[in-house]
Amino acid sequence: MSSAALAMNEEPQRAMRWVDLAPLEAVPLGQGRAFVLDDRTIAVFRQRDGRLYACDNQCPHRGGPLSEGILGAGTVICPLHSWKIRLEDGHCAAENASVRVYPITTVEGRIVVQMPGVD
């Protein structure tokens, strides 16, 4: 399948795997942190209400580090040019662009994220 045939938020079908990232305390309430997994860097956010989100760390506009952005109300604002990303689905609020989001949860006090497996 050509890359043109893939939507921005999709990849070829691969087995998914759960990856243990860190203890929950590694991401303070109201902040984000970057984690390197395989060949990608993901941003993990922990809202003040405790809800977790995970997405690719690069803003689709100019590659800004989303993990360093301002978090609030289920969105992150890119620190470079203020693009607003909805963390639930990865879509940019005012642009026709998106970032990939990943399922995330906690297991026994540890953050785990679902990532595509290795072919």
Image (tube, rainbow, N blue to C red):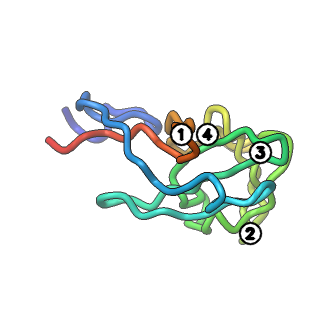
Classify the position of the C terminus by image quarter. Answer: top left
Closer to the chain start, of discs 4 and 3, is 3
Q: Which residue is mark 3?
A: 75
Q: Which residue is mark 4?
A: 90
- Residue 74 at x, y percent in the picture: 78, 40
Q: Nearer the viewer, mark 4 or mark 1?
A: 1
Question: Around disc 3, counting alpha carbons within 10 Å, would you say few (fewer than 14), some (14 to 19), or many (20 or more)?
Answer: many
- Say left or right for 43 vs 28: left
Q: Which element type, helix, strand or loop, lies under badge 1?
A: loop
Q: Which residue is mark 2?
A: 79
Residue at x 31% of width, y 60% of height = 39
Residue at mark 4 to residue at mark 3: CA–CA distance:
9 Å
Query: Which of the numbered marks, if any, corresponds to residue 108?
Result: 1
Closer to the chain start, of discs 2 and 1, is 2
The amino acid beneath tag 2 is Pro
Q: Nearer the viewer, mark 3 or mark 1?
A: 1
- Residue 67 at x, y percent in the picture: 64, 63
Which one is in front, 91 or 56?
56
- Say left or right for 101 vs 85: left
Q: Which element type, helix, strand or loop, lies under badge 2?
A: loop
The amino acid beneath tag 3 is Thr
